[in-house]
Image (cartoon, rainbow, N blue to C red):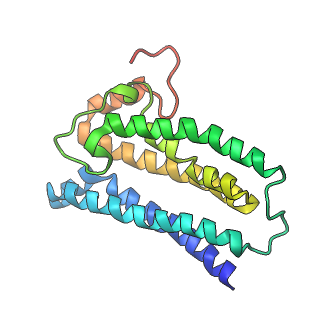
Amino acid sequence: MIEWLNLILLILSVVISLYYYIKSVQPAKLELKIGEIAYAKCERYRVYASIPFAFFFISYVVYVFYPLPLPIPNELPWDYTISVILAIIVTIPSFALMGIGVKHAGTETLSPKKEHTLYGGIYNRIRHPQALGEVWVAHIVALILHRTFLFLFAFLWIPVFYYMSVVEERDLIIRYGKPYEEYRDRVGMFFPKRGKNS
């Protein structure tokens, strides 16, 4: 029973986090309806999005003690040492991308501001470095916990992060207009565009 409740919590945490994050990355669209207060509201939405994200990881840990009765091996098919090594290999670039993205985005990472300009730094190479780094965190935790289902479930975050990035870009076009469209044409979403000057 606990394992099924935990699965529900796991799914709800993804859905609720996605819901609030999507709301948080649309300040320009919301501003058209309610004015500049939209930016403060979106900052709160971003905080709300992080709370269920924390429950997602709590559910991952609970799963170790209460796994689902599935017709797949509970543990990953290789030695735990390999899982730890893979987790370290993925963690280094993942956290580096997140950290550099946060540094170059500045306060806009958590607190959208109307007066904020387009970013520089790593954002001249890829448009969503934070998303590209963060999308692998669930895989890293699944590897450390060495659980097959959790590792497979982590793949759910790939389309989720892609969708969040697409929605955010729609709002950035409302916010910045043609300069953002030109930036989008010049700079790759998750990987640098070949042969394009930044």
In the foreground, 145 or 27: 145
Provide residue 33's location: percent of width, then percent of height: 19, 60
Provide residue 5's location: percent of width, then percent of height: 62, 81
In the foreground, 84 or 114: 84
Q: Does 5 appear above or below 194?
A: below
User: Taking 176 as reference, is 103 left or right?
Assistant: right
How many callouts does the rendering have? Answer: 0
Provide residue 58's location: percent of width, then percent of height: 55, 68
Residue sitting at x 56%, y 74%: 9
The N terminus appears in which quarter of the rendering?
Answer: bottom right
User: Looking at the rendering, which quadrant does residue 99 occupy?
Assistant: top left
In the foreground, 159 or 80: 80
In the foreground, 169 or 5: 5
User: Looking at the rendering, which quadrant does residue 85 occupy?
Assistant: top right
User: Looking at the rendering, which quadrant does residue 37 occupy?
Assistant: bottom left
Residue sitting at x 43%, y 26%: 187
Residue reaching furthest bottom? 1
Q: Does 180 appear above or below 3?
A: above
Residue sitting at x 82%, y 50%: 79
Provide residue 104's location: percent of width, then percent of height: 33, 33
Residue reaching furthest front? 81
Q: Does 105 appear above or below 53?
A: above
The C terminus appears in which quarter of the rendering?
Answer: top left
